[in-house]
Amino acid sequence: MPDIKEITSLLQNLTDKDLALIQKAYTFAQKTHEGHLRKNNEPYFNHLFATAKNIAELGMGSTTIAAGFLHDSIEDVNVTPEEIRKEFGDEVLFLVEGVTKLGKIKYQGTTRYNESLRKLFVAMSQDIRVLIIKLCDRLHNMQTLDSVPNEKQLRIAKETLEIYAPIAYRLGIKKLQRDLEDLAFAYIFPEDFEKTKKILKAKKGEVEANLENFEKSLKKELAKNGVTNFSMDHRVKSLYSLYKKLQKYKGDVEAIYDISALRITLPEIADCYRVLGIIHGAWRPLPERIKDYIASPKLNGYRSIHTTIFTGDGAIVEVQIRTEEMHKEAEFGIASHISYKEGAKKKTTNPNLLWIKKILPEKRDKDLKSDGKGSSGDIPSWVKELVEYQKEAGDEFLDHAKSDFFEERIFVFTPKGDVIDLPKDSSIIDFAFAIHTDIGSHLSGAKVNGKFLSITSTLQNGDRVEIETKKNAKPSYKWLEFCKTTMAKRRINNYLDNFK
Ligand code: MN
């Protein structure tokens, strides 16, 4: 039997209560899945253990880990919900039932695909931890995909690449995204996979040697400037992201400078800029490749400074500079914001991750209704919008979901500081309808960052928008041209149909 310490050793500040809960779930899963085998004749318990371990590796707490052990118990071995409630309480039951409802999703053409997305959005709108368990379950299924019949492999791998990996990306869980993509890549494009692997292998030796040389000089330079509190490591580009980049550069591997990058983590943001200054003082940077994602985070919340420099001995090296907090956030995304004391929201200083705070579970005990369901008050608007929309739409759902969900989002603020997230290129009209139908329907003007702008203006990430309404203002056909969201378009069409 796998050793439970493999899991508990990953947890910080483990309490006796946490340990008891994990131990209980471990034993319960072992007992209820006794004699239950996977397709490759391995004990099924190994899958439950691996899923729970994946969850622990993301830094999640004991409740989610316990639910990981139990996630297949209702579906596969007929444990009753009552039994789980009695042994583990409402919160664990809620998570297990959430994962069970996602069910054995099948990817077979558009209809099933839509169904999968629908279920995922509904799950996400209830409790984000359900989705994290599902992603960790999928990771282990991908790691053991060899034991599944050939015709099923391709379907599961495609679903992973097209649904699960983009969701991990959207939630900022880079570690999961990378693993899921590389595993799926091998099954979907086996020839390209082998080719990319070869390219990486051939190039890696040279790049790593450059990095090691540069690392020595850089450490000297930092010491000379009194910077001693830092850690340094290399990261190698994942196979799938190298493959995509090679496609972008028409196969020219020499044009890709970040196959391997040097990463420096420091305590404070000010330290990052200081180190950037030291590097640029000593080596010449490639001008177009200085990227300050600390000042302007990527839309999925990623923060770091990137610069690519000539090392002076003919090599070109990318350096990534960030704080400890940013590094954790970059690897674990939303999971890094659900602390080991689940329910306690951690503060983030990152404006692009503010929306995450909105979908984190509040103190569960307080919020749990008698039926064990979580509160639905804190769901970001795009999830609510999709859940509402999918009820009405048929097969169009896929297209809309793809453009609304997977495309980049912007985050816009109300005067009170509430965050409204919208698809990129949304206008003031979209913003007004996202707040309330009445506000959209009577929109007459708006101030953006203190300045009056036309209501058809496009909004930018981080804008602060103050809406003005007038009783006799009303939507017109022209407004439709300046809407990006399906919600605003539907509301306007409704208005135009009803009040001609
Ligand atoms: Mn499973």
Image (cartoon, grey):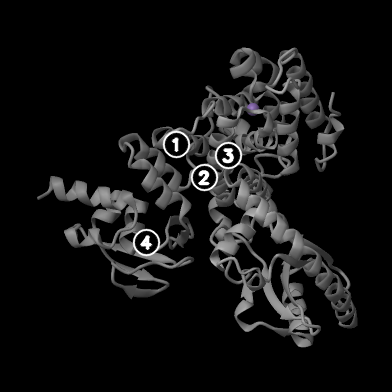
Residue 266 in the image: state x and y as whole percent. 79, 67
Q: How crowded is mark 1: few (under 14 residues within 10 Å), some or many (20 or more)?
A: some
Q: Name the residue under label 1.
A: 113
**Which residue is nearer to you in this view: 144 or 499?**
144
Q: What residue type is labelled 4?
A: Ser
Q: Which amino acid does label 3 sit on?
A: Ala
Confirm or deny contact between disc 3 and disc 1 (CB under 8 A). Answer: no
Instruction: Tell me the CA gap for discs 4 and 2.
Output: 25 Å
Residue depicted at 42% across the width and 35% down the height: 109
Secondary structure of the residue carrying tag 3 is: helix
Task: Tell me which numbered mark, 3 or 1, is placed earlier along the sequence.
Answer: 1
Instruction: Tell me the CA gap for discs 1 and 4.
Output: 27 Å
Where residue 273 sits, quadrant-wise, is bottom right
Is residue 302 shown to the viewer in this render? yes
Q: What is the number of the mark on residue 162?
A: 2
Instruction: Tell me the CA gap for discs 2 and 3.
Output: 9 Å
Compared to residue 80, the image places residue 181 above or below, namely: below
Task: Tell me which numbered mark, 1 or 4, is placed earlier along the sequence.
Answer: 1
**Which residue is nearer to you in this view: 393 or 492?**
393
Residue 68 shown left or right of residue 205 in the figure:
left
Residue 245 shown left or right of residue 144 in the figure:
left
Q: Mark 4 points at which residue?
A: 426
Confirm or deny contact between disc 1 and disc 4 (CB under 8 A). Answer: no
Q: Which amino acid does label 1 sit on?
A: Tyr
